[in-house]
Image: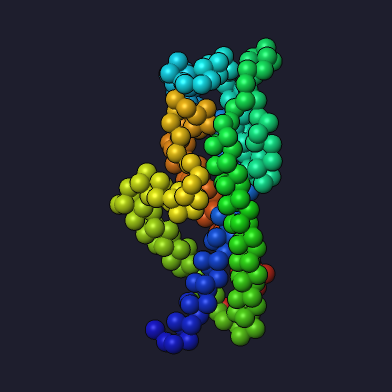
Amino acid sequence: MSVKTLQTYALWLLYSLGSLLISFWLAWQLSAQVNFLYPLWYSALKIDQTIEQTMPKHLYKREFIATDIDEHHRLFAQIVTSIQNNGQGLDTIKFYSPSGKELGSLLTESEIVHLNDVAALVDILGWFCLAMLIFCLTVLAVIIMVRVAMPSTKKLLVSMLSVVVAIVVLIVALGAKKFFYWLHTVVFPDDHQWFFYYEESLMSTLMKAPDLFAPISIQLLVLSMCIWILHLMLVRKFGRFRTV
């Protein structure tokens, strides 16, 4: 393989990695608009049964047992909306009976602090992806100016899938739950609680944490790849690149 070919693949690899991160951000934003398909995963994971089994043992808010499935969907949607808006409104989320009677506040102070941390992280990732967009546009401009050929979509897809699969295999090998918990210790402040027992937390019960995050992660990954592939097709069409 020639030096020129290696340079071509190196430039496109940089662009591809950056654009995949942007695609993930877009996938997050799109998923947030439909509450990450929570009603679907709620049914698949039988979260209603988890709530029924947990509420009699709950230490503080056993009256939550009086809520129904529609209310659970609404509460999760409110949490998503607050996270997407810098944590605004988390302290005002109430839960109600089917008749409309207010039964209590959903979140404890520690849960509000944690979800505010999540909202701050989402905000930071948004700014990071904006910087990544500028980076990708710069790389793409360089590619166009020096007339670098574009690898076939198949080659780029295989390369990126290899990276993604390698990361997934590594996470599975280390233990997905163990990795998930370790990640929390890295991204959140040491003195902020992020682990909550079902018997103490309506939030954890409502999400059947951490089980809910597995299908949502797969959903985000698949949607990210679809967005990324579509964007590559558009770049090829309008850039009119030579193929290598």
Determine whether 134 is above or below 43 in the image: below
Q: How many marks?
A: 0
Q: Nearer the viewer, residue 133 or 157?
A: 133
Query: Where is residue 5 drawn, in percent x and y?
Result: 46, 83
Tell me where residue 3 appears, x and y as whole percent. Answer: 44, 87
Q: Which image quarter is the N terminus in?
A: bottom left
Residue at the (43%, 58%) spot, across then down: 164
Of all residues, the one furthest to the front in this rendering is 191
Q: Residue furthest top?
A: 99
Task: List the single residue furthest toward the bottom.
Answer: 3
Please give the name of the residue rendered at 31% of the width and 52% of the height, measured from the top-left corner.
Answer: 174
Q: Is residue 2 left or right of residue 77?
A: left
Q: Residue sitting at 64 percent across and 60 percent down?
A: 127
Looking at the image, which is closer to me, 226 or 51? 51
- Residue 93, can we see it? yes
**Residue 37 in sight:** no
Q: Residue 137 occupies which quadrant of the picture? A: bottom right
Is the image coloured rainbow, by chain, by secondary structure, or in one colour? rainbow
- Residue 221, horizontal then vertical, whole percent: 50, 51
Relative to 92, say whether 239 is above or below: below
In-front residue for pair 88/49: 88
Q: Is residue 36 above or below residue 235?
A: above
> Where residue 175 sits: x, y (%)?
32, 47
Indicate whether 153 appears above or below 10: above
Tell me the residue at 36%/52% (across/down): 171
